[in-house]
């Protein structure tokens, strides 16, 4: 349970951190909240030569409105997201998702940037940021680029981020009129991670039909994904319990469903349908209630 030796750096600015990751490339690991990296290092599943501690950088922990979007700094903790009044009013899905993560200690230390960059197949945020069509901002010494959430997750524990890049910000749109979103999760009882987690967002037309549906799923496959077959089955239809249940049956379509000692492939697939229906029903109720 003791990590392999490493050289520790605690840069004072983002620019300094970027220069360090550029210099050390894939021999370096960023340390944010440490709640994924440190367990891996202690188990020697990760043995970076350089650890670059960005957890102390100032100015990367915030939730604010910018140009009609909500901008969240990568070092914002799950607890700050859970308790944000701005998110409660304008993007409840993200606050609700943060509240479902681990326990109080994990939420107080873990960061949204660390969780997304780590891309654990059972992490909660990926489902939400997919359903929200979020944008992720990655910085290098030569500038920034914007990565759409749908392109961010490449495979298990693998994202679009290159060595030398730091995820700095996540941007989401505030809730639109006649829309609602919700997260429903089946917790793995020991760790709290998602056996299955579904984030759903729906927008209604003035006539009450489903104009837009976005469904992000985590825990089911090697990476989080958008359940497009569920979305297709909903769009343009009048909402009903039967419609939601029928559409939710498609939640595991086209995915290589994981199987482990916690849940078989068949159970996970079944639970994906159950939790998709629950998330969609809650999202729809919010859309109908709030107008
Ligand atoms: C007991 C326990 C229970 C948990 N339960 C859950 C749960 O229910 N749901 C859930 O979603 N998660 C859960 N987690 C994981 C937790 O949310 C972590 O905090 C999160 O996955 C990683 O965030 P971090 O800030 O701790 O990142 P770190 O551990 O510091 O880093 C994780 C990885 O991301 C990289 N990284 C970090 N920040 C950046 C950045 N800004 N740019 C680029 N790369 C970066 C690091 O180099 C590292 O490879 C749990 C963890 C523990 C220990």
Image (cartoon, grey):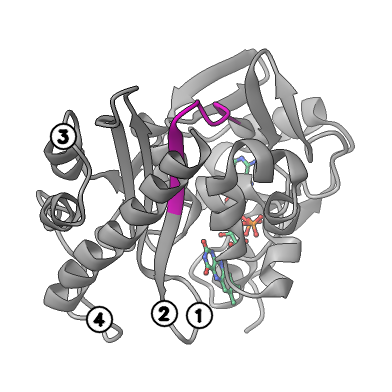
Residue range (magenta): 171-182
Reply yes or no: does residue 179 show up in magenta: yes
Circles 2 and 1 in contact, beta carbons < 8 Å: yes
Circles 3 and 1 in contact, beta carbons < 8 Å: no
Q: Is residue 26 visible?
A: yes
Q: Could you tell which of marks 4 and 2 lies nearer the N-terminus? A: 2
Disc 1 element: loop
Is disc 1's CB within 8 Å of ligand 1? yes
CA gap, disc 3 to disc 1? 38 Å
Q: Could you tell which of marks 3 and 4 lies nearer the N-terminus? A: 3
Residue linked to disc 4:
263
Q: Is residue 223 left or right of residue 80?
A: left
Residue linked to disc 3:
237
Residue pictured at 25% horizontal, 81% vertical: 263
Circles 4 and 2 in contact, beta carbons < 8 Å: yes
- Front residue of 95/208: it is 208
């Amino acid at each position: 349970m003791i990590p392999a030796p490493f050289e520790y750096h605690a840069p004072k600015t983002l620019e300094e951190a970027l220069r360090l990751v550029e210099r050390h490339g894939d021999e370096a690991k960023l340390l944010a909240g440490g709640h994924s990296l440190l367990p891996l290092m202690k188990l020697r599943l990760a043995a970076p030569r350089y650890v670059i501690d960005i957890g102390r950088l100032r100015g990367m922990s915030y939730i604010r409105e910018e140009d009609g979007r909500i901008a969240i700094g990568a070092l914002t903790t799950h607890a700050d997201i859970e308790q944000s009044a701005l998110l409660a009013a304008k993007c409840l899905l993200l606050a609700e998702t943060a509240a479902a993560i681990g326990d109080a200690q994990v939420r107080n230390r873990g960061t949204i940037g660390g969780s997304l960059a780590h891309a654990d197949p059972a992490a909660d945020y990926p489902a939400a940021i997919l359903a929200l069509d979020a944008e992720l901002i990655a910085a290098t010494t030569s500038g920034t680029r914007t990565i759409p959430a749908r392109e961010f997750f490449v495979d298990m524990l693998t994202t679009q981020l290159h060595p030398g890049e730091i995820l700095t910000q996540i941007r989401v749109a505030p809730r639109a009129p006649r829309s609602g979103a919700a997260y429903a999760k089946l917790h793995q009882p020991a760790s709290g991670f998602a056996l299955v987690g579904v984030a759903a967002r729906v927008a209604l037309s003035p006539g009450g039909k489903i104009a837009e549906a976005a469904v992000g799923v985590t825990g089911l496959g090697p990476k989080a994904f958008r359940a497009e077959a569920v979305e297709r089955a909903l769009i343009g239809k009048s909402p009903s319990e039967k419609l939601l249940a029928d559409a939710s049956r498609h939640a595991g379509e086209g995915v290589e469903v994981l199987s482990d000692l916690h849940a078989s492939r068949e159970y996970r697939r079944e639970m994906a349908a159950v939790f998709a229906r629950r998330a969609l029903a809650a999202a729809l109720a919010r859309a109908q209630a709030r107008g």
